[in-house]
Image: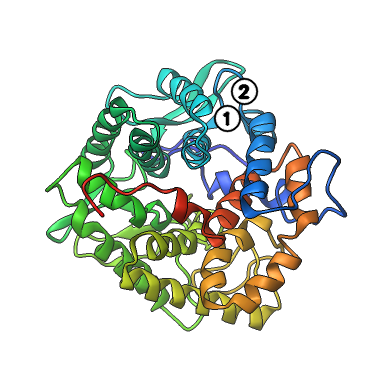
Amino acid sequence: MRSRDVHAPRLPSRLHGVRRLVAAGLAMVCLAPGVAAGQDVRGTPEDTLAALWQSYRDRYITAKGEVVDPSREGRVSSEAQSYALVRAVWMRDHATFGRVLAWTDAHLRRPDGLYSWWWDPARNVALDRNTATDGDIEIAYALAMASVVFERPAYATAARALVRAIRAGATLPVGDGWFPSAGNWAGPERIVNLSYFYPYATPWFAWLDPGAGWEQLNARGYALIARSLDAGPWALPADFHVLRETGGLEPLPPGHALSALFSYDSMRIPWRVEMACRLLGEAQACRLSERLVSRLRALQERDGRLVTRYSAEGVARNAEESTSFYAAFLPGFQRVAPEIASTWRASHLGAGAIGGVMRDTHRYYDANWVWFGLAAADGVLESRTPAVPGQP
């Protein structure tokens, strides 16, 4: 949970995975006894996603296009803006997409084409002008898809500029190629966050920025995630790592300000890899997703639950569960271990739980990841993700 703000050179102020760990007290699993009137989540998967999206727009997206998190004093992050943009594309909601994009460009866009990650609407000022590469990549991915879905070539032009800005300002040389860094600040220490690796987006970026190395990125990213699992029988990828130029993946130095745990950042890795399996049909992605499911399944069997903080060695550091975690893991389990996915849908992701997410105004992270998890697990994103232009 966020306990302090630290302003260190070259480091963003979001220490200890603050975007996720703040949820330890405010967005933990809360299995509501029922669904509030007007928040009926019965029906088709599309009905549930539409209800969740309407609830999210009402609670978190302002008329100006800010995506606010009440649990963090109504502040705005590039991640929040990017999640709204990509969900708006998948929901075919052009009006919301345009409103959120206009605010994001007007307030967060930097001279180098990247986006500041942290904004205070109350003071109308950037609290941290550093970048978070996940927000930049998600915005670029949303723009690329939007250029096809909404038939607006200008979005592809904007996506191309952002993709090139990411490559110029937020990557690290690795061997004969490169890998995304955690942000514009991460170069001196060579900090990476493996949940900032979006394998399902790289074909779009290769289309926008051909011959620049995007085509080789997925194999490199899958190898790094596999290497984190190779560290031990219970090992998991940490939120942040040090990536050596030789390709070696190392833990953060002892006492480092950033999170060395598997927690609210790295919990997104299984979802991203499973998305690549489903959208790209990459055998390497499918095998890696199956390996991640196996590791998480073993941890659940060992501990009787999946918790929100593990050491990189797989030692549970708390006893808290989160709706977001089960939702992010659901798509992989749905394909690999459907019997476990079914029990989660009845317990952690049932109508009561979903209704609680929709009803509560302080569950921004759950409100995103329940939607992402269900949309991927139920195959909706496969049907709503357009093909990359020029590809079958």
C-alpha gap between disc 1 and disc 2: 6 Å
Residue 333 image position (x, y, % from top left):
56, 72
Query: Looking at the image, which residue is at 53% across and 49% down?
Result: 17
- Residue 188 shows in this picture: no
Asked if the residue under mark 2 is in contact with the one under mark 1, i.e. CB atoms within 8 Å, the reply is yes
Q: Earlier in the sequence, mark 1 or mark 2?
A: 2
93 and 215: which one is in front? 93
Q: How many marks?
A: 2
242 and 63: which one is in front? 63
Residue 307 image position (x, y, % from top left):
65, 66
Residue 309 drawn above or below residue 135 = below
Mark 1 nearby-residue class (10 Å; few <14, some 14–19, many ≥20): many
**Picture quadrant where residue 155 is located:** top left
Quarter containing the C terminus: bottom left
Read off the residue under disc 2. 62
Mark 2 nearby-residue class (10 Å; few <14, some 14–19, many ≥20): some
Read off the residue under disc 1. 67
Disc 1 marks a residue whose amino acid type is Val
